[in-house]
Image (cartoon, rainbow, N blue to C red):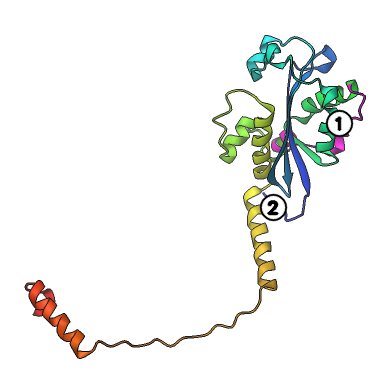
Amino acid sequence: MQASNEIVGREISLDTETTGFKPQEGHRMCEIGCVEMINRVRTGKVFHMYVNPERSMPDAAYNVHGLSEDFLKDKPVFKNIADEFLEFVGDSRLIIHNAEFDMRFINAELTHARKHNIPNDQVFCTLLHARKTFPGSPASLDALCRRFGIDNSHRTHHGALLDAELLADMYLELMGGSQVSMELASLSQDTEDKNAPKIEKVTVQPRSFPANEEEVSAHKKFIAENIKEPLWGG
């Protein structure tokens, strides 16, 4: 995989949990998680919200993410966090696994909240990219984590923030992470070499500290009194 040393700027890995598959059938978003990356390095800054879907939770959806109707009933509705979400995202590129699914729900919620929709050209789908990169191979988030050696053993349920964090790590590897890191390190080293002050090397001659007669005599006495039949005694 060819790595690139381009400066990619700010990106957001994003995941959602929902009550079902299609917003047009009345399903809603119930959790959203976003992880900030700058130049494909996680910054530690996140946006995470549980959302009251204003409807019941089907058993099939609950079995996927473990978010119950009772747990979500006192959480904010999406229209009350829409501005905060849009401010966090800004015009940064969104990194989403199976982006078509998540963007259907995000834009449906933004429409309900009377906010502008996020355009498709702001979104990068890692599922489509993985299928092109590894044709015929499993391309789920779990499968790609296994491929790249990313530990997802703590993922007993789907969770928007947890999946967004795993996605950020997987995305780095998918885009040639190790090679990119080495290239950036090389670029950094080149910069240091050019800007570092020149230091003149000074060679110091070795110094000799021979033992005096008293020290030699004391050493011979120690050997005679403490070491019986030394190997070097002949």
* CA distance separating discs 1 and 2: 36 Å
Left or right of residue 22, residue 202 in this image: left
Left or right of residue 201, residue 97 in this image: right
Instruction: Tell me residue 227's x, y (percent).
Output: 10, 72
Left or right of residue 153, residue 120 in this image: right
Which quadrant holds residue 182?
bottom right
Picture layout, residue 179 above or below residue 26: below
Left or right of residue 14, residue 216 in this image: left
Which quadrant holds residue 188?
bottom right
Return the residue nearer the eye: 64 or 46.
46
**What's the magenta region?**
113-130
What residue lies at 82% left-to-right and 42% top-to-bottom?
92
Instruction: Tell me residue 163's x, y (percent).
Output: 66, 31
Disc 1 crowd rating (10 Å Cα; few below 14, some 14-19, many 20+) is: some
Name the residue carrying label 2.
3
What residue lies at 64% left-to-right and 24% top-to-bottom?
158
Instruction: Tell me residue 107's x, y (percent).
Output: 86, 26
Name the residue carrying label 1.
83
Q: Is residue 121 magenta?
A: yes
What residue lies at 73% left-to-right and 41% top-to-bottom?
36
Q: Secondary structure at mark 2?
A: loop
Q: Amino acid at mark 2?
A: Ala
Q: Is residue 77 magenta?
A: no
Return the residue nearer the eye: 80 or 112.
80
Picture layout, residue 67 above or below residue 87: above
Residue 38 shows in this picture: yes
